[in-house]
Amino acid sequence: MKIQDLIENILKGSQYLGTFTLPELFTFARAGSVSGIAVAKEAGKDLYLALISGEPEGAIYIDEKGELYGDKAVMMVTGHEKFVFCEVKPDIVEAVVMGCRIFEKSHLRMSITYVLPEIGMKSQGMGVLTLVVQRDREPQNGIRVSIRRDSKIVGSDVTTDDGRVGFKVLYGDYDCIVQDRNQMITSFRIKFNEANPKNILEL
């Protein structure tokens, strides 16, 4: 039996708790130390998150190109999904997690994507950083792009048909991590300021 069918069978007999955005899901699950499985489905893409005692422990991402598990699945989370959350017994969730465990949970924290300026920091400036991912000057869609500052991921999204992603962040220097569908990772160092709001990333 495929993992997708297994999870769907588990969910059929589970109690529906609500539909949430990712931040709402984490807030709700942590408040009640809830164990369960959350599902987001849109446009041929299925994303499953397994939570134990309110904490995300496993992830599965499925689309027409195949299946991704654990940390690789988490890289496909945009933060814009709507998750249907069902309560499931912790031992059953743990059995699911064994095949899709998340080790690098900072990727999920990015879903509260935007870094807001703190009081006294307004002079730094803030704007929308646009990144365009290209290969041989052709825009690349469906590419996971994450940006990191001071070792923390502050934004993550997937490129659109024109190869673009955008992040509302403070001006400054960022490390940019690009992951294509073959799981090849390329990193770039970018500078973002009022005079330089757009960067082209050539793979």
Image: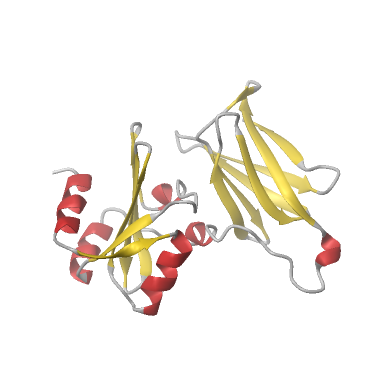
Between 157 and 106, the one lying in front of the other is 157
Q: Is residue 42 left or right of residue 154?
A: left
Q: Is residue 161 above or below residue 103?
A: above
Q: Quadrant of the C terminus?
A: top right
Residue shown at the point (55%, 58%) measured from the top left: 110
Q: Quadrant of the N terminus?
A: top left
Q: Is residue 33 left or right of residue 111?
A: left
Q: Quadrant of residue 58?
A: bottom left
The x, y position of residue 3, in whole percent, is 21, 47
Between 36 and 183, the one lying in front of the other is 36
The x, y position of residue 174, in whole percent, is 71, 51
Residue shown at the point (52%, 57%) measured from the top left: 111
Extreme-front residue of the structure: 18
Extreme-bottom residue of the structure: 32
Q: Quadrant of residue 121?
A: bottom right
- What is the number of callouts on the image? 0
Between 200 and 86, the one lying in front of the other is 86
Q: Is residue 127 above or below residue 135?
A: below
Residue shown at the point (18%, 43%) measured from the top left: 2
Residue shown at the point (32%, 74%) measured from the top left: 53
The x, y position of residue 18, in whole percent, is 32, 64
Please, which colouring scheme is shown? secondary structure
Q: Is residue 147 above or below residue 201?
A: below
The x, y position of residue 173, in whole percent, is 76, 52
